[in-house]
Structures are given as C-alpha cells and as structure tokens.
Amino acid sequence: MKFWQVTVSMFVIIATLTACTEQKVPTPAATTAGITTNHVEQTAFSATSSAVRKAAVLANTSSARTAPKVKYNNGEDPAYAKKCGWPVNCPTPLPGSILPNKRIVAYYGNPLSKKMGALGEFPKDVMLQKLKGEVAKWQAADPATPVQPALHLIAVVAQGAPGKDGKYRMVVPDKLVNQVYEWAHEAGAIMFIDIQTGHDDLRAVLPRFEWILKNPDVHLGIDPEFNLIKSGKKPGTKIGTYDAADINYASGYLRDLVKKYKLPPKVFTVHRFTKGGVTNAREIKLRPEVQMVMHMDGWGAPWLKRDSYMSYVVAEPVQYTGFKLFYHNDTKKGDPLLSPQTVLKLNPKPLYIQYQ
C-alpha cells in the first residue's frame, strides 16, 4: 500500500468512527431490531479500530524500511563502544581537573630536532601561531568543549646509540625544559614532559623530573614504543611495550606529587598503536588525582588510523582517549590530514589531540 493510500484510508476510517459515535444508543425499551442495530454498531467500531491499528503498523513498517541505515567507519560506532565498556565508570573529577570538560590540543616534539614534531620543526613564534590556529579549528568544530593548548616536550629521547651509560636515551638539559615551559606560559598553554626510556627504567627516570612536575600546569606522557629494556633491542628496530604495572607505578607517582604539593589532578598520556604496546590494560588503576589518556599514536592512511583507534584504544577502555595527527607521515602517500570534524566522529570522542 502506498503512503497516500494509507492516508486516504485513515481519513475514511476516522470519518466512519465519527459517524458511529454520533448514532444514538437504543433505550432499554428498544425492540429486537434496535438491539440488532446496536450490535452492528459495536461490530463496526471494532472493525474500524482494527483497521486503524493495521494502517498505523503499515505506515510505521514502511517508514522503517525507507529510513537510511547509518554507516560507521571503524572507531565510530557507538554500539561497539558501548559493548566494549564506554563510557568508563571512573572517579568523579576533582576540582581543577582539565578532563573531561576541556579538550587538550598539543604540539609535540623537541626544539633540538626539526624531525621529531611540530614543537621543534618551526621557529618558536611560528610554532605558537600555528598551534593557535589548530586550537581555533577545534574550538569551531566543537564549540561546547573549551580547548586547552599544550606543548608536549620529549624530555627523554630514545637513541640508536648506547651513549656513555649504555641506556640508549638522552635526558635533555633542564635549561631546555625551562625554555619550553616559558613558551607554554607565553601561549597560555600547559606542558607535558614526555619520556622515552630506551634501556633505562621508568622508575629511575621519572623522579628526575619532580622539579618541573611539581608545577600545577605540567603533566606527563610515556612512550611504550621506546621502552626496550626487556627486549634489549635498539630503539627504532623494534616496538617496545609497557605493562599495566609500569603505568600504575607512574600514575601512583603522580598521585603522590598531587598530594605532596596540593596540586590539581595530573593528566597522564600513554601512547599506543599496537596490541603489545600496552599489556594487561584492564589492570590499569584509576586514581582521582590522575586523569589517564590512552593515546592512539599511529600514523598512516585514515582507514588505518581508525582501525588502530578501534582495536587498541576503544577495545580496551581505560579512562579517556587521545588521537595523534602527523603533518607529514599521515599525508606522505597523498592522504589528507584528518580534520577535527572527522576525528570527532570517533566514539568515544578523543579529549587529547596531538600534532607531530
């Protein structure tokens, strides 16, 4: 039955209903013929009601058949996210928390290298202006979520050579850390200290940065890719890993700093783009003083980045999510850099965005 046929039929039915209800009900003194007439009225009313219900069902069925199905790319389907455990049941944000009320947009890198990311690729003034432009794009894409700019400094850099201590990593001078911290203040940005341990132990390296992490606007990132102490491989020749025990150590350390110095909660990013990059993710502890971000750190074509986000971030919920965009590696084969509007289709929506 066509839609217009259903509509016409329903008008006829409604008219019939009106006529039936306007007829007088026979009095108790009615004859047998009168009783028969009332029975006919009831039968007509019942048949009419049935026809109305049938017409409504047909109309709803027709609408359901013609309604377009939503097609999701990998990483975007809310039903899949819910099945995996999103949203996560996590501690209520403490006063001064950045997440989830804001989105962080960060430039990553090291001023000593133009090849490690936007933070070192461009002169300081150009870099800060470009970051301001990206912040504006994200604010326009999601006006309801304020954007917090950030500078994400690689303060411990994995090396292909062992160095004097055989640790395959370089700790940048405190002077350089302070310089970037000053840049962050100039831009109204927060700062992240990022650690690539090489063959060093996170438990030995992290306390080295208490002097800067004790500031309320300095946060932490760790990179499993360059933690290779267990494998003994050189950084860059194999992808490293962190276990939940390592991550719990670092978040516990941050919790203690928050309590010791009476700080607002720390944001803690963990880079991940492989299954083995983080082991036993379900055992990662959530603490009110630390806001955990599992950050999709892989580069490549848009479909590959979505796949990685779905497989390694959405599939193993922790607390909040992040997504990295590479100006060069994502686009070197002719693919476009994902726009804020496209990234915001992911589910859950990333609250930490990093540009390299």
Image (tube, rainbow, N blue to C red):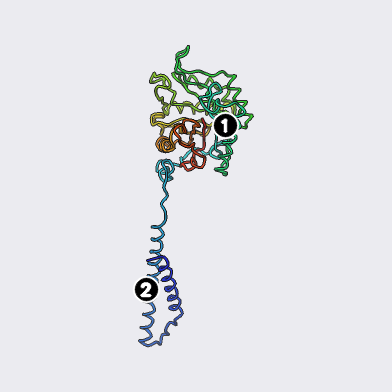
The residue under label 2 is 47
Comparing 36 with 311, the one in front is: 311
Report whether 7 appears left or right of 260.
left
Comparing 203 with 219, the one in front is: 219
Whether tag 1 and tag 2 are in contact, CB under 8 A, the answer is no
Q: Amino acid at mark 1?
A: Ala
**Relative to 346, does residue 34 appear above or below in the rendering?**
below
Report whether 228 appears left or right of 119.
left
- The residue located at (37%, 73%) in the rendering is 47
Comparing 328 with 292, the one in front is: 328
- The residue located at (51%, 25%) in the rendering is 116
x and y, in percent, of residue 247 in the image: 45, 28
Q: Quadrant of residue 19?
A: bottom left
> Which of marks 2 and 1 precedes in the sequence?
2
x and y, in percent, of residue 276 in the image: 38, 29
Q: How many marks?
A: 2
Q: Is residue 313 visible?
A: no
Q: Cα distance, mark 1 to mark 2?
A: 69 Å
x and y, in percent, of residue 142 in the image: 55, 43
Quadrant for the N terminus, please: bottom left
The residue under label 1 is 150
Q: Is residue 340 visible?
A: yes
x and y, in percent, of residue 265 in the image: 55, 32
* Secondary structure found at label 1: strand
Report whether 17 appears left or right of 125.
left
- The residue located at (41%, 26%) in the rendering is 241
**Relative to 16, does residue 104 appear above or below in the rendering?**
above
